Image (cartoon, rainbow, N blue to C red):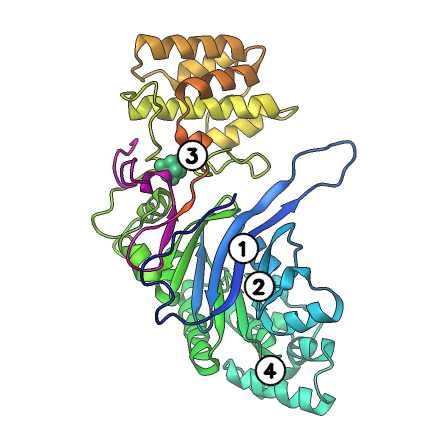
Amino acid sequence: MTATIPQPAHAGVDEPEPFLEINDLETHYTDGSLLNQQPPVRAVDGVSLTVRRGETLGLVGESGCGKTTLGRTLVGLESATAGSVTVDGTDVTELSGENLRDWQRRVGMVFQDPQESLNDRQTVGEIVAEPLDAHDWQTPADREERVFSLLEQVGLQDEHFYRYPHQFSGGQRQRVGIARALALEPEFLILDEPVSALDVSVQARVINLLEDLQAELGLTSLFIAHDLSLVRHIADRVAVMYLGTVLEVGPTERVFDDPANPYTRSLLSAIPGSSSPAPDDLDRITLRGTPPNPRHPPEGCPFATRCPAKIRPAAHPDISAEALAAIEAFRAVLRERSRASEGLSTRLKRRLGLATSGRAVDAIVAELFADVGLSPEARDVIDRAATRARTAPGEALTLLTEEFGSVCDREPPAAHAVDDTDRTSRCLRHRADEESPGGDRRD
Ligand code: SF4
């Protein structure tokens, strides 16, 4: 998905210089089997982002949206299949051998689960020294001294050098992981859900440590998380990711105070309680269903199958929100049915939360449209689609898409500048000829 990003009037004024520029980055996976030629999984699918020197960029989104794969691609742990990541004029996705090692030396990575990411058969001293050994950093005596100094820097004691990870609490293990990430004095830190596996009481202490280190060392950071309150607290800017692409990016306070993209609005509004980072006047929106299969992303807007603000079909401008939601669910059933070779009922249940096991299409349609008012014309199309779906679900899907699909199903939205900051959002409603993303919600 390629996007042109209109530049806001103030762009380039008083902004820190870019450390890393991501352009149309893709990381796709094929399963490599000759017998089962499936389309690739589009884990990262056209991400364009800038990470500025000295900033913390928060990367948020639902589980499976591609956040972790993006972080791993930046450091060369996954191979990009297209696009570029430019640092100091070099595309680091093209590096190999010694040049790749040099780049990886400039990046520290902290992983989500300190239990998993630390080798229980090594002492803490050995774990923290690992990157120093791997890069043959100075002399063995210098390395040992460096490890003691790192332990102190992350709030551990000298005596911890000789202990094993299983002798530590979760918070202490994550401190070990942070010490290891800092060993080679990186310029860039990728923090992949660094506190989500920790008790709430421990999270704050680790976050304080990360903030102190950031200030002390002047690091540039990518902070990957699904906890929006945490990201609001720690990030200078935030990027909101969905189905392998970034739908909104901008200064943290602006994005949280006045989310521009329907997906950002949905994510924020889903957080209950007084500690929610959502603005007070944001309507609560229920996000229906789950994201589409990343092997088969929608042709138009990635969020089109769930968007509560989706632009209505030209042929049915007055159709109700409930009817559109039921049609969207019917289309999801048909999409699955036209692709499924086995295990259909399980997949349907998982996707829709419906008791579809062993049911015929007629029963699914009856359930979906039981309390939904439809015009005679719309009802006729649904009946024809249901009849066709018994033998040709792909044709039924085409019929529904032709009749009830909107521009959101056909056209990938470009990134639009949405205010006087550098914020951008991908939504067709930002175009002058469409309503604003906040209006005309389907529920
Ligand atoms: S382009 Fe359409 S489906 Fe996508 S976010 Fe905007 S209104 Fe929703």
Residue 300 locus on image (x, y percent):
47, 34
The kind of residue on which mark 4 rests is His
Viewer-side residue, 419 vs 433:
433
Residue 398 locus on image (x, y percent):
51, 19
**Distance from Cα at disc 3 to Cα at disc 1:** 23 Å
Mark 2 burial class by Cα count in 10 Å: few <14, some 14-19, many 20+: some
Q: Earlier in the sequence, mark 2 or mark 1?
A: 1
- Where are the magenta residues, as a range? 416-443
Mark 4 burial class by Cα count in 10 Å: few <14, some 14-19, many 20+: some
* Residue 281 seen: yes
Viewer-side residue, 60 vs 23:
23
Q: Earlier in the sequence, mark 1 or mark 4?
A: 1
Q: Quadrant of ligand 1?
A: top left
**Distance from Cα at disc 3 to Cα at disc 2:** 31 Å
Mark linked to residue 410:
none
The residue that disc 2 covers is: 86
Residue 131 locus on image (x, y percent):
68, 75
The residue that disc 1 covers is: 23
Majority secondary structure of the magenta segment?
loop
Q: Secondary structure at mark 4?
A: helix
Q: Secondary structure at mark 3?
A: loop
Q: Earlier in the sequence, mark 4 or mark 3?
A: 4
The kind of residue on which mark 2 rests is Thr
Q: Quadrant of residue 438?
A: top left
The residue that disc 4 covers is: 160
Q: Earlier in the sequence, mark 3 or mark 1?
A: 1
